[in-house]
Amino acid sequence: MEKLRYTSLKKGDILLIKLAGSLDLNTASKLSDKLGDEIKKGARKIVLNLAGVDYMASAGLGTIISAENMLTKNGGELRLSSLSEKITKIFELIGFSHVFKTFDSDDEAVNSF
């Protein structure tokens, strides 16, 4: 499996993070650290673009939940954008499609704040 790539871009007060590769046990902790650092630095509105994520294990799901919880505790919000069909099916199967605010595009996610 491909390792996780992480790129970020500020759009006003919104942090857009694009992920690509595998979000598994090995990469989830690194993503968790990066998200935690961004939140500690003051990020309160984060969009995670998952278009390039080709595999997501339970550890990856846990990382996204943790980020959502950390943001909520700090008065922030998380949005997910551009989920592939495969990741959308995973979210639907475990009921996450009702837990997270998901959008077809980054622009829709950014404009939803």
Image (tube, rainbow, N blue to C red):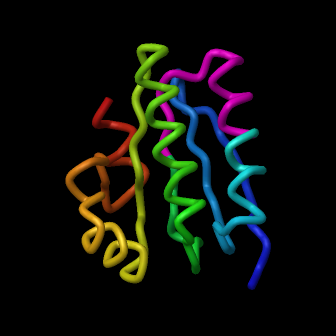
Q: Nearer the viewer, residue 44 or 113?
A: 44
Q: Is residue 45 above or below residue 109?
A: above
Give x and y (percent) for residue 101: 29, 46
Q: Nearer the viewer, residue 16 or 59?
A: 59
Q: Which residues are magenta?
A: 34-47
In the rendered structure, the answer to whether residue 40 lies left or right of residue 90 reads right
- Magenta stretch containing residue 104, yes or no? no
Give x and y (percent) for residue 45: 47, 28
Residue found at x 65% / y 40%: 9
Give x and y (percent) for residue 75: 42, 14
- Quarter of the view holding residue 109: top left
Q: Nearer the viewer, residue 70 or 2?
A: 70
Residue found at x 57% / y 34%: 15
- Quarter of the view holding residue 78: top left
Q: Nearer the viewer, residue 88 or 27?
A: 27
Q: Is residue 6 above or below residue 42?
A: below
